[in-house]
Amino acid sequence: MSYLSEVEEELESWERKIKKKSSMVSRSAKKIQNRINDRIPERFHSIVTNGIKTMVQGVLAGNTYTVKEPDINQPLQVRDEKARRLILKYKRIAATEGAGTGAGGILLGLADFPLLLSIKMKFLFDLASVYGYDAKKFEERVFILTIFQLAFSADEARRSSYERIANWDDTLNQLEIRNKFNDEHDWKSFQLEYRDYIDLPKLLQMIPGIGAIVGAYVNYHFLDWLGENAMNAYRKRIIEVKDEEQ
């Protein structure tokens, strides 16, 4: 079997995983979390929403993260090998950061939120260059944010993000894409999707005595999951382009 055939099989398995409905336990946890969110003061939601909005707008503006020059003229197998090494590197970075903040109790546990967010975004920017895409371009930064939404959202939003990635040319052809992401995006829904995904593990991270272990494990897992989705998103995009050229 050729390497490309192996990748295509892995992509089919990934697609099934993305489109699979969440378990009953996950859906029940989501309902409980929704009720908890309804009881949280709107002022707190506003603070977190503005934080997420600032992060997203910084990514779209291209002034937040250093962008590496894209790797060019490399076969997919070489890119995948580089991507796996990069994922391992960032999983270790995230685990170390999670252990450090988890050992510090509630105050440092709260600091983990922006730190982990920054690690995830820096990883995505570096991965773009591995697969030959220039994150200096606005459309590539939108792609990065779409991967982020794909990895850390519930069923409906996850499938929607996947469809945008799977049909990326159509996504880019939508009118006024820049204004859509800057002005019309539902920032509160964006942050709630992300926060709901990470809430329970992060609460456990703040428990004295086990916080360091939980923080290291959870952050490692989050980067592993993000890496799997990001790697497959770029692979799918590259293969789609090759199919169109044939």
Image (cartoon, grey):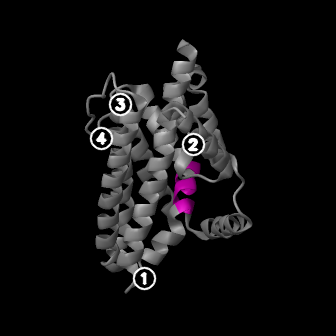
State the mark number for residue 124. none
State the mark number for residue 64. 4
The three-letter code of the residue at mark 2 reads Glu
Q: Which residues are magenta?
A: 189-197
- Predominant secondary structure, magenta span: helix
Tag 2 secondary structure: helix
According to the picture, the residue beneath numbered tag 2 turns out to be: 10
Q: Is residue 131 among the parts visible in the rendering?
A: yes
According to the picture, the residue beneath numbered tag 1 turns out to be: 207
Tag 4 secondary structure: loop
Residue 213 falls in which quadrant of the image? Answer: bottom left
Tell me: residue 154, above or below residue 233: below
For discs 1 and 4, the disc positioned in front in the rendered view? 1
According to the picture, the residue beneath numbered tag 3 turns out to be: 135
Q: Residues within 10 Å of mark 3 (few under 14, many from 20)?
A: many
User: CB atoms at circles 1 and 2 under 8 Å apart?
Assistant: no
